[in-house]
Image (cartoon, helix red, strand yellow):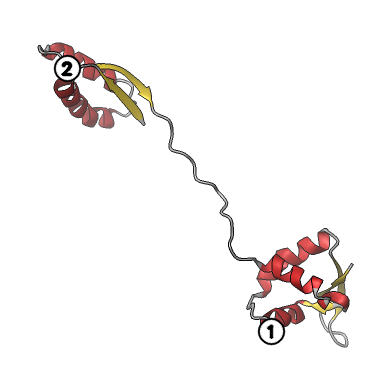
Amino acid sequence: MRRITLAKPSAKIDLSAAVAEAERIVEVLRDPTLRAVAFPKVLDLVLTDGTCVSVGRTQPPAKRPTQRESTRPGPLARLKELVEDGFFDQQRSSPEILQALAERGYVLKHADLTWPLSNLARTKVLRRKKQRIGDGGRLAWFYSNW
């Protein structure tokens, strides 16, 4: 965004000087279409408000923070509550964890637990072990206290 600094208007306006000043201002624009649209507006500014002294960049708008502070705890905080309450004293599967959270009023999907459970296993809060479900069933992760 460009800033135009104007001098005090003079009593006499030299049209050729005003046109030259307007051309000098818009020559920094690379796009010819934009330059053609901007020229009459800049010329009007020069003729009505005075002669332009300088052209410079204004400061860019302040960037908004990319990450907002959450007011509600997420799945990781809910899992930490279960750890503190001793829920993981026994090995638990994902469906059991989802059921326990649902009983506490936190309805989550399996995908909501994937990253938080992995994070807790990486930080050695929980231990993760792959076991078969039932007799010869499929393999699944089971989580327990470290």
Mark 2 or 1, nearer chain start: 2
Q: Residue 21: percent from the left, percent from the top?
A: 22, 15
Kindly indicate the quadrant of the structure image that contains residue 132.
bottom right
Above or below 92: residue 23: above
Q: Residue 43: percent from the left, percent from the top?
A: 18, 23
Judging by the rendered image, the residue that carries numbered circle 2 is 9
Measuring 77% from the left and 74% from the top, which residue is drawn there?
82
Judging by the rendered image, the residue that carries numbered circle 1 is 103
Measuring 66% from the left and 69% from the top, which residue is drawn there?
112
Q: Residues within 10 Å of mark 2 (few under 14, many from 20)?
A: some
Which quarter of the rendering shows the C terminus? bottom right
Label at residue 132: none
User: What is the three-letter code of the residue carrying label 2?
Assistant: Pro
User: What is the three-letter code of the residue carrying label 1?
Assistant: Glu
Q: CA distance from mark 2 to mark 1?
A: 75 Å
73 on left or right of 19:
right
